[in-house]
Image (cartoon, rainbow, N blue to C red):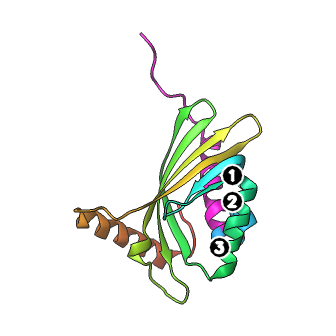
Amino acid sequence: MNDTRLPELSHADESAVRGLYHRVLDGWNMCDGSAFAGPFARDGEAIGLDGSRYAGRSGIAAEFGRILAEREPAEYVAKVRRVRPLAPGAALLDAVAGMVPPDAVDIDPALNALHTVIAVNRGAGWRIALLQQTPAVFHARPDLAEALTAELRALAARTPGPAG
């Protein structure tokens, strides 16, 4: 019989993966495409809320630099729900995120999202292989949408920027 238990993820590795995610959001909030892309692997990918796919750290930096320069973006607030191992040197981070538009004090519920990060450590430290953003619309489940909005709203009221 095959052992299907996942490997353990050390506290240091979990902290490193969480740190990558927070650095991405901090890069966005600072309107810095290079800082946003910095935590990605050289061949990493990002998938935006609209389904756009951005490939490679340099491509991500260029595209997000352009996006952030074109308009004043909404600021992220986020909470990491969990980090778990997938295999040796691979981890999954699940988070929820909201955005506070410029000149606003409250999140825009239409921008709520689920973030999924696949992080890898190929021997030179942890990097993001994939960041997937999925709109948190919860079709036919308004209770879930309202609960997430309330959670993110409370988070935005307490501290600016990413949390958890």
Residue 91 drawn at (x, y percent):
56, 40
Q: Left or right? Give the position of 84 relative to 127.
A: left
Q: Amino acid at mark 3?
A: Ile
Question: Reading the chain from its start, which is encountered first: label 3 or label 2?
Answer: 2
- Residue contact between numbered discs 1 and 2, judged by CB atoms under 8 Å: yes
Question: Reading the chain from its start, which is encountered first: label 1 or label 2?
Answer: 1
Q: Is residue 157 above or below residue 55?
A: below
Q: Pointer 2: what residue? A: 60
Residue 154 drawn at (x, y percent):
41, 74
Q: Amino acid at mark 2?
A: Ile
Q: Residues within 10 Å of mark 1 (few under 14, many from 20)?
A: many
Residue at 27% over, 62% down: 139
Rendered-image quadrant of the N terminus: top left
Label 3, label 2: how many angstroms apart (C-alpha)? Answer: 10 Å
Q: Pointer 1: what residue? A: 40
Residue at 24% over, 67% down: 142
Q: Pointer 3: what residue? A: 67
Which segment is the magenta one? 1-27
Q: Left or right? Give the position of 141 relative to 152.
A: left
Q: Nearer the viewer, mark 1 or mark 2?
A: 2
